[in-house]
């Protein structure tokens, strides 16, 4: 069955569906192509639903701030409750030697206009009795939030559908046809779609799509594992608590590789999110194992050990499930890739949101829709251009 | 039947059959994993032990397929709830 | 030699379609003796036709008449020379698929022995309705014997006499309405003013409640027996509600009883979400009704 669209979005995760929504809002005919039987089954269905603001620096920080603003009004806009909550976040440390780094951190983010303050251990424990005596200092920040990532994904898809977008499931892309350096159609195992624009929002699987045009998209799947606990009483003040080591481990790939510490080698740094129901998702970890999303005992062990250091009560809390997902990580600089490409007019890349996909979903959708329809974006995205990779080559038609 | 609306299919998350059917129809769902993500059926304390067969049957009815044609909920460790302190104590294993 | 009545047969859609094996499927199974072999004396009939990893019957037979060997998924093979119809293997089959047929129990009757795991058990001499593999009543029978030794691990074996022509069809009796536990599982002594106490459990087995202990439930002291599950002590004390749900505040109590459904969870010694149906009592235990998520101890 052959179709025609103005834009084909490859990938039915939060990014793909957000792009579809914002394009459909502008009256563009979009078809989203997803290789699995349903939406939200990649990293979009295996995260913690968190939108941390204090973890980011320029150039991502500007996008995150804007994205959080979009989240605030999204439930109303799409007429579906995505359960956005302004929970704030607490970055804290159990290592005395990290104290100066924490001071630098709060200074840096305050300078960027983020609402944050440093809190000493004793005051932390008074405000939040769950925190243990090993917690020395923390940085509380008010703008972070959390959402229900599944509802975001489906809510955006459903709203896009109401505005005319189509969703083709169980449809794997095998080829992208080009004529004179211009995209002309997408071939899937459920038929061909004639189109002028193709958006590569395939997350961890985006390199395979890029390869169809001879492009080397420098993305590797970075596995993250999570422990889910039984429901427990809600924390008094902070339901989003982050380990200070997160800043090193998540953003400095070499630190993890060079370290002798077993926990650092597995990329484990605490990231604790408590849902409304009382369940905690205990993360987070990082390793590069290809497309393997299995849960492994050594990582689970260090996730468990680490959470007990921050919140000792968790010793007696039950783990009822574990899961793992694959983040699309750009191994050159860890930043997302949001841009057109030279030599393949109509091909747009929107991926690389490793650990920030849910946070950046709304703004990515908006910016890519602007890029496609107006060829200019309301926020600068030059830092995320594909052309920054010198080794990028395109196949001449 | 009025009463049908109040039949609870997921006891842990207190979900009625109607809520599950409504979600399946609204979003055109085809897999049990999606139903789980959107309704929380199977995310409660019993992790789907009670509701999974019911969810699959409802899904089969709504999408006109046989239960045997559908993928089950993804199974993950642990096989039963385990205290975090035991996960933390586990013997020094090799990184896989 | 008894009168050779014409044996009644049955039809079915087969094991994988209907759950009831056809005459052919049974005929092909090496665990089922032929009609001629049955004429010679009582024999075990192993109506096992699916290759699954299961072999307790092989170990149960003291005469080596049942062979499974390797792989464990083999169908059991009955050696009719070695089998004397003693019936020891009946209680060993988890699928309740083994029977003993004595075609020539008398001129008119055959004796069918089958495993029976319902309560109440019938009485010897009782007239019963005999049922086929589907549970449908097909004829009348009389209970000749009931064996329920500890070694049988709660799988009693009932032997009934039935008209000979039904010997290939009858495989059970109709289950009567079970009266309350009081009839078969009561104890004369009563704690907390109640005679009701759970004494057998499908997974945990026979309960041997030990000495008296005291536990506190919602600030009220109740008597329990060491070794029994918390829920058993609660039932004995007349408590049916264990918790109230988080969303709608509805009461929940014992549901599955095997540690799966989590309806029975309560706060035990300060720890919430404890499954009381699989957690034994201890002296001095403090148990509270859990409201929603409970509270930290």
Image (cartoon, coloured by chain):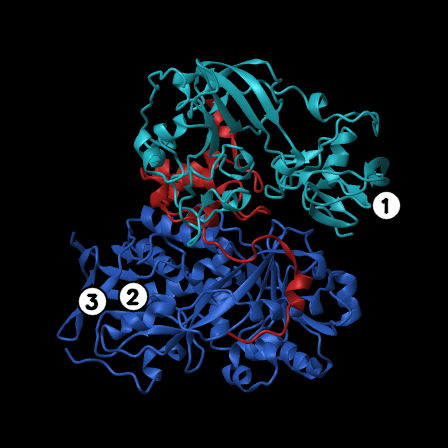
Chain colours: A blue, B red, C cyan
Q: Is residue A151 visible?
A: yes
Q: Label 3 to label 2, Cα distance in Å?
A: 14 Å
Numbered mark located on residue A175 in the image: 3
The image position of residue B69, as x and y in percent, is: 33, 44
Q: Which picture quadrant has residue C265?
A: top right
Judging depth in this view, the residue of C184 and A92 nearest the camera is C184
Above or below for A72 versus C165: below
Q: Position of residue C260 (x, y in %)?
A: 59, 43
Using residue C251 as the reference point, say whether residue B55 is left or right of it: left
Q: Nearer the viewer, residue C21 or A282?
A: C21
Q: Which residue is mark 1?
A: C284
Q: Chain of mark 2?
A: A
Whether marks 3 and 2 lie on the same chain:
yes
Task: Give me the chain letter of mark 1.
Answer: C
Please indicate, yes or no, whether residue A80 appears anywhere in the rendered image: no
Q: Chain of mark 3?
A: A
Which tag, 3 or 2, sits closer to the chain's start?
Answer: 3
| Secondary element at image label 2 | strand
Q: Is residue C115 left or right of residue A351?
A: right
Q: Nearer the viewer, residue C208 or A318?
A: C208
Q: Which residue is mark 2?
A: A199
* The image quarter in which residue A244 lies: bottom right
Q: Secondary structure at mark 1?
A: loop
Judge depth for marks 1 and 2 and give the one in front: 1
């Amino acid at each position: 069955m052959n179709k025609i669209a103005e834009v084909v979005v490859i990938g039915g995760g939060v990014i793909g569906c957000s792009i579809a929504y914002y394009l459909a809002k502008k009256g563009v005919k979009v078809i989203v192509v997803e290789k699995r039987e349903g939406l939200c089954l990649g990293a979009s269905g295996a995260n913690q639903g968190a939108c941390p603001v204090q973890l980011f620096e320029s150039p991502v920080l500007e996008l995150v701030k804007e994205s959080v603003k979009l989240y605030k009004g999204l439930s109303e806009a799409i007429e579906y409750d995505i359960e956005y909550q302004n929970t704030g976040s607490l970055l804290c440390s159990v290592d005395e030697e990290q104290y100066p780094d924490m001071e630098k951190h709060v200074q840096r983010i305050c300078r960027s206009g983020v609402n944050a303050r440093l809190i000493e251990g004793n005051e932390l424990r008074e405000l939040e009795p769950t925190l243990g005596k090993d917690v020395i200092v923390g940085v509380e920040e008010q703008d972070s939030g959390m959402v229900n990532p599944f509802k975001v994904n489906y809510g955006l898809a459903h709203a896009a559908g109401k505005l005319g977008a189509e969703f083709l499931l169980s449809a794997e892309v095998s080829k992208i046809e080009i004529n004179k350096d211009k995209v002309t159609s997408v071939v899937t195992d459920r038929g061909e779609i004639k189109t002028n624009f193709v958006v590569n929002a395939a997350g961890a699987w985006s390199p395979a799509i890029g390869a169809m045009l001879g492009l080397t998209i420098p993305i590797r799947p970075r596995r993250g594992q999570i422990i889910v606990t039984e429901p427990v009483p809600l924390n008094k003040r902070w339901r989003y608590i982050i380990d200070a080591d997160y800043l090193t481990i998540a953003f400095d790939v070499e630190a993890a590789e060079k370290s002798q510490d077993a926990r650092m080698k597995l990329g484990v740094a605490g990231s604790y999110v408590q849902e409304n129901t009382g369940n905690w998702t205990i993360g987070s970890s990082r390793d590069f194992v290809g497309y393997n999303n299995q849960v492994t005992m050594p990582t689970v062990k260090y996730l468990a050990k680490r959470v007990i250091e921050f919140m000792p009560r968790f010793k007696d809390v039950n783990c009822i499930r574990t899961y793992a997902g694959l983040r699309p990580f750009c191994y050159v600089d860890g930043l997302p890739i949001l841009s057109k490409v030279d030599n393949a007019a109509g091909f747009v890349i929107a991926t690389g949101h490793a650990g920030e996909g849910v946070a950046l979903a709304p703004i990515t959708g908006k910016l890519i829709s602007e890029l496609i329809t107006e060829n200019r974006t309301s926020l600068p995205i030059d830092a995320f251009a594909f052309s920054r990779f010198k080794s990028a080559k395109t196949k001449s038609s | 039947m009025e009463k049908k609306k109040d039949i609870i299919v997921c006891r842990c998350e207190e979900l009625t059959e109607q809520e599950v059917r409504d979600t399946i129809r609204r979003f055109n769902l085809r897999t049990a994993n999606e139903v789980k993500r959107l309704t929380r059926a199977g995310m409660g304390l019993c992790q789907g032990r009670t509701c999974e067969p019911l969810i699959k049957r409802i899904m089969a009815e709504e999408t006109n397929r046989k239960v045997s044609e559908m993928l089950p909920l993804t199974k993950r460790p642990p096989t039963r709830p385990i205290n975090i302190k035991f996960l933390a104590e586990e013997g020094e294993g090799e990184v896989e | 030699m008894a009168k050779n009545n014409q044996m009644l047969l049955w039809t079915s859609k087969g094991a994988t379609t209907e759950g009831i094996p056809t005459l052919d499927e049974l005929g092909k199974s090496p665990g089922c003796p032929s009609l001629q072999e049955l004429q010679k004396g009582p024999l075990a009939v192993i109506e096992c036709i699916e290759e699954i990893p299961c072999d307790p019957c092989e170990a149960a037979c003291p005469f080596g008449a049942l062979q499974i060997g390797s792989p464990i998924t083999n169908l059991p093979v009955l050696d009719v020379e070695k089998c004397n119809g003693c019936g020891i293997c009946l209680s060993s089959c988890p699928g309740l698929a083994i029977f003993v047929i004595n075609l020539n129990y008398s001129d008119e009757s055959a004796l069918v022995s089958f495993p029976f795991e319902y309560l109440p058990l019938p009485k010897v001499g009782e007239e019963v309705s005999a049922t086929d593999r589907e549970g449908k009543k097909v004829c009348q029978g009389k209970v000749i014997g009931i064996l329920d030794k500890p070694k049988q691990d709660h799988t009693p074996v009932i032997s009934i006499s039935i008209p000979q022509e039904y010997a290939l069809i009858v495989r059970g009796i109709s289950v009567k309405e079970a009266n309350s536990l009081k009839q078969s599982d009561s104890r004369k002594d009563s704690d907390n003013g109640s005679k009701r106490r759970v004494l057998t459990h499908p997974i945990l087995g026979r309960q041997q409640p030990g000495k008296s202990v005291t536990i506190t439930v919602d600030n009220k002291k109740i008597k329990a027996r060491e070794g029994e599950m918390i829920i058993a002590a609660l039932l004995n004390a007349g408590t049916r509600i264990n918790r109230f749900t988080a969303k709608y505040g509805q009461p929940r109590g014992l549901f599955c009883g095997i540690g799966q459904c989590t309806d029975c969870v309560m706060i035990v010694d300060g720890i919430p979400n404890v499954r009381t149906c699989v957690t034994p009592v201890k002296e001095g235990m403090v148990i509270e009704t859990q409201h929603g998520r409970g509270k930290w101890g």
